[in-house]
Amino acid sequence: MSIPPAQDRSDLPEPSDPILAQPAAEPEPVAPPEPAAPTPRGPSQRPGAWLGEWFTRRRAIAAAERVTAEHRASIETILALSDQRGEAAETLWTSGHLVEALRLAVDAFRALDELSVPESVQERVARARAAAAAEIPPLDPAMGAVHTERYEAIQVARRAWVRVERARIATTGALRWQRARRIVGLLLALAALGVLVWLAVRSPPRVDVSASGQFPGAQYAPGNAFDDDEATEWVLPDGEAGWVEARLSPPRDIGKVRILNGRNGRFGDRAIQDYEVTLYRGTEAVAQHEGSFERIDASPEWTDVPIGGRGITRIRVEALSHHQRGTALAEVAWDE
C-alpha cells in the first residue's frame, strides 16, 4: 500500500502570523434611534373635541362620504349574518339547548373575522376569541358556569363589534338625522333643566289671609273667604262691620276681582250690604271700587269688581255695612 506524499504546508501562515494573531474586530455599537417627535394634538385630542364631534358628527359624515355603496353593502351582509346567528344562539340558550347555543354563538362571532377589529373593542374581542377557541362539551349536562361565562363573553364582544361596525358604515343621511336628534335632545334637556331651576328658586304661590275679626268658631274663619269653597263663609260678630284681606306672594297681575256675598248658611240672616274692594302694591293703593248688595240672597251669585293692576300684593274687601244680624262673605277670587 502506497502512502500519499505529505502536503506541502509552507504556504500556510504560522500561528505567530499577524493575520491569525490579530483578534477579531468587535462590531461597532449602533446608536439607538432618536425618539420620535411627539405627535401634535389634533382636533380629536383637544379637551371637549369629542363632545363636539358627538353632537355635530362632522368627521363621521366626512368619512361616510368616502364609503362606497358596494363596500357598505358587503359589510352589512357580514353583520346581518352574524346577527342572525347570534339571535338564533340566544333563542337556543334561553330554551335550554346550551351546547348548540354556544356552538352557534361561536359561529356568529367568527363570521366577523373578515373584518378588522376596531380599536375600541380589541380587548373584548381578544377575550372572546380565547373563549371561542376553548373546547365545547358534547352534551348539555356537561355545561357549567365557566361555559356560561364563555357564552356571555362571546355574545357581548360580538354585539359591541357589530355596533361599532354599523356606526362606521352609517350613511350620511343617517348621521345627519342622528345629529339632529342629539341637538334637539340637548335643547330639550336644557329647557327642562331651566324649568327645574326656575321651580327650585321661585317662591311657591302663597295666600296669607287676615281680618279685623270673626265670629267665634273655626267655621267662620277669615280663610273661608279665600279657600275656593262657596259653601264656607267668613262671618263677623253681631252688628259689626270690618275687613278681610289676602296677602299675595309672589305679587300677581290681576285683571279683575270677583266676590260672592254670604248668607250665614241655613240661617240666612247675615250678608254684606255696602262694600269697598282695594288693591295694593306694597303700601300703595293702586285701585279701588265701591259697591253694594240690595238684600240677602238665598242663592248668591258672583259679582264682578272691575278693577285690576300689575304686581298686586294685597286684596282687601271691607264691609262698610251689613244686612240683618251682621256681616258674612262667602268668597273672593280674581282673574290673572
Image (cartoon, rainbow, N blue to C red):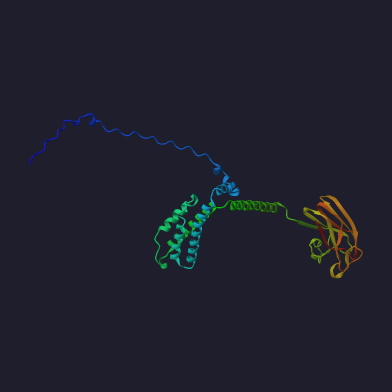
Number of numbered discs overlaid on the protein picture: 0
In this picture, residue 324 sits left or right of residue 10: right
Percent coordinates x, y for residue 178 in the rendering: 60, 53
Q: Work out whether 252 lies above or below 136.
A: above
Q: Front-most of 127 and 295? A: 127
In this picture, residue 233 sits left or right of residue 124: right
Q: Work out whether 239 lies above or below 49.
A: below
* Quarter of the figure that contains the N terminus: top left
Quarter of image, res 146: bottom left
Q: Front-most of 105 and 250? A: 105
Percent coordinates x, y for residue 36 in the rendering: 46, 38
Furthest-bottom residue in this view: 266
Q: Front-most of 138 and 324? A: 138
In this picture, residue 87 sits left or right of residue 298: left
Q: Front-most of 303 and 118? A: 118
| Residue at left offset 85%, top offset 61% | 259
Percent coordinates x, y for residue 108 in the rendering: 47, 59
In this picture, residue 278 sits left or right of residue 70: right
